[in-house]
Image: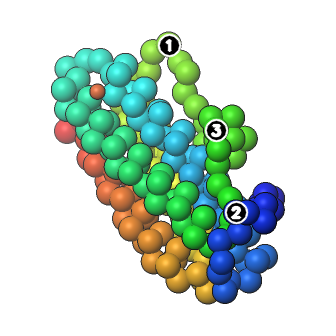
Amino acid sequence: MAETPSANLKTPTDLKTNAAANVADALNGILADSFALYMKTKNFHWHVSGPHFRDYHLLFDEQAAQIFATTDEIAERVRKIGQVTLRSIGDIARHQSSKDNDADFVAPAAMLKELRDDNLALVEKLRAAKDLADDAKDNATSAIIDDWTDGAERRAWFLFEAARTG
Ligand SMILES: [Fe+2]
């Protein structure tokens, strides 16, 4: 349920409040999952091991940077449509629907699969958010979601190919 912005934070918009709140709800969930995926990708960057260390270490760092770059865009879309976004690590945890991985050791193949699945889950959430943005006539959110979707699909593709064994 979207937080009602205080009067001081109501950015002017012609969008209907209820429809904008639905978009903000979806975007705040995507933002939380993006921070969680950023952290997981960095976790794997730091803890990966084995003969493909260099490849995977660098791939995960590149993907973490891509994910991190989307977080500011997501949060600012929420503010541009007159809604409020996340404020803390606790707020991320409350809005996050993807799972953390705090395991002592994760095999490299399992890292590739888990990140691929998380990125594909993000794509599903982005598609659902795009429907809400279209319903709200929020065409700027709808358009930028296409870029975020393309990035997540690109990451899933790289993770899929890197996981091939032959
Ligand atoms: Fe690093």
On the image, the x and y values in percent for residue 53 come to: 23, 23
Quarter occupied by residue 93? top right
1 or 3: tag closer to the N-terminus: 3
Viewed as shown, does residue 29 lie left or right of 139?
A: right
Q: Secondary structure at mark 2?
A: helix
Quarter occupied by residue 131? bottom right
Q: Residue at x 39, y 68 (%)?
A: 147
Q: Residue at x 71, y 69 (%)?
A: 10
Asked whether residue 15 is in view, the answer is yes
Residues tagged 1 and 3 counted as in contact (Cβ below 8 A): no
- The residue that disc 3 covers is 88
Viewed as shown, does residue 117 lie left or right of 25?
A: left
3 or 2: tag closer to the N-terminus: 2
Which mark, residue 104?
1
1 or 2: tag closer to the N-terminus: 2
Badge 1 amino acid: Asp
Quarter occupied by residue 59? top left
Asked whether residue 135 is in view, the answer is no
- The residue that disc 2 covers is 9
Disc 3 crowd rating (10 Å Cα; few below 14, some 14-19, many 20+) is few
